[in-house]
Image (tube, coloured by chain):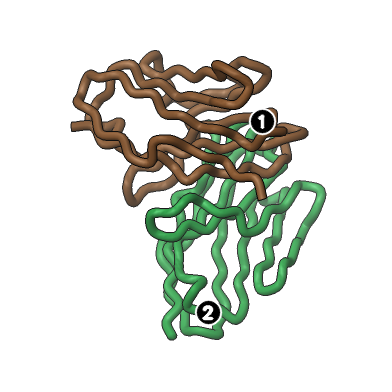
Amino acid sequence: GENVEQHPSTLSVQEGDSAVIKCTYSDSASNYFPWYKQELGKRPQLIIDIRSNVGEKKDQRIAVTLNKTAKHFSLHITETQPEDSAVYFCAARFYDKVIFGPGTSLSVIP
Amino acid sequence: EPEVTQTPSHQVTQMGQEVILRCVPISNHLYFYWYRQILGQKVEFLVSFYNNEISEKSEIFDDQFSVERPDGSNFTLKIRSTKLEDSAMYFCASSGGQAVTDTQYFGPGTRLTVL
């Protein structure tokens, strides 16, 4: 069945450093890949998304890259700040179904 | 900015009871979804709904679950006979336009506690 894997499960960085989270997906039919940030007790919030006709997308300190051939995509956060600390989920859309990865708990140490 | 809303924010029920979770999607959206998240775990897809019928469902979404859009604004998830393992946060989401690539907006969630 459809599956999304995500690594690492936890990530700790110093403030100002970069953070990279990587995901792979199983179904080559998927063509939409959102990333969500979830703070404790809150709803997932979309931070960036990428569609399959694009290889890279950037929004200020956040960028996402997609390699459709290898079926993997990555989130890059530069100049991390303490408020970036949260759980980050990648996801992949398979037709009308969105499958989430298991999440990465990011801690930014001041 | 329009938002997805959900009620109640917290529902406590006894095992075996029926519960209905309610959602009001963003008004011009056409696609509706339910997800659940067990505490500390990932977000799991339950079901998607379009044009008054289910378009996709996961293995979790068995005969105990049903969804309905009873009027032009509400979207409900019913669990017929709750089990302890149904305790989780349930999120509703909606998206507009083209289903395959459109952005989903999540509601604040309903925390379901089954005793």
Per the image, the residue denoted by label 2 is: A81
Task: Report the side of B75 relative to B43 (left or right).
Answer: right
| On screen, residue A55 above or below A107 | above
Residue A69, position as x, y percentages in the image? 72, 49
Residue B7, position as x, y percentages in the image? 43, 35
Mark 2, secondary structure of its residue: loop
Crowd tier of the residue under label 1, counting other residues whose Cα lies within 10 Å: few below 14, some 14–19, many 20 or above:
some
- The amino acid at mark 1 is Tyr
| On screen, residue A1 above or below B55 | below
Most foreground residue, A14 or B10: B10
Residue B46, position as x, y percentages in the image? 48, 30
Most foreground residue, A33 or B72: B72
- The amino acid at mark 2 is Gln
Q: Are marks 2 and 1 on the same chain?
A: yes
Chain whose colour in the figure is green:
A
Most foreground residue, A52 or B106: B106
Mark 1, secondary structure of its residue: loop
Per the image, the residue denoted by label 1 is: A95
Where, by quadrant of the figure, is residue A36 drawn? bottom right
Chain whose colour in the figure is brown:
B
Q: What residue is shown at x 25% (from left), y 19% (from top)?
A: B17
